[in-house]
Amino acid sequence: MSAEMGYYRKPIEPGVLLELKKKHPCGSRIWEVVRVGALIRIRCCVCGRWVDMEPLALRRAVLREAEK
């Protein structure tokens, strides 16, 4: 299966701010990448909640890179 056009294709590195398609319950869409490995750990920029996601699932959820 080839990569589809809707995926975020830039490299995901720690420190990058990402805007996700769906809002977090706190109302924020902006998340910071904290750790990259078998799972990618992201942190909500409003409430500080941590979430581990699989790389492909995160690429599907990303709308765009957010400005710092």
Image (spheres, rainbow, N blue to C red):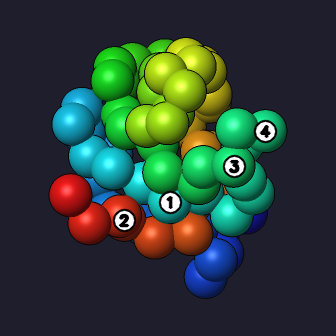
Report whether 39 appears left or right of 34: right
Q: Element type at marker 2?
A: strand
Relative to 32, does residue 41 appear above or below in the rendering? above
- Rendered location of residue 44, percent (x, y): 51, 33
Q: Are marks 1 and 2 in contact (CB under 8 Å)?
A: yes
Discs 2/4, front: 4
As measured in the structure, the alpha-carbon distance from the residue carrying label 4 to the one carrying label 1 is 14 Å
Q: Which residue is mark 4?
A: 25
First in sequence, mark 2 or 4: give its number: 4
Marks 3 and 4 sit apart, C-alpha to C-alpha, by: 5 Å
In the displayed orientation, state which residue is furthest to the bottom: 5
* Separation (CA) of disc 1 from disc 2: 6 Å
Give the spatial CA distance, label 2 vs label 3.
18 Å
Which residue is pictured at 70% across the width and 38% down the height?
A: 26
**Label 1 amino acid?**
Glu
Nearest to the eye among marks 2 and 3: give it: 3
| Mark 3 burial class by Cα count in 10 Å: few <14, some 14-19, many 20+ | few
Side of 17 relative to 2 (left or right): left
How busy is the neighbourhood of tag 4: few (under 14 within 10 Å), some, or many (20 plus)? few
The reply to whether residue 3 is in sight is: no
- Residue 19: which disc? 1
For the point 37% across and 65% down, the residue is 65
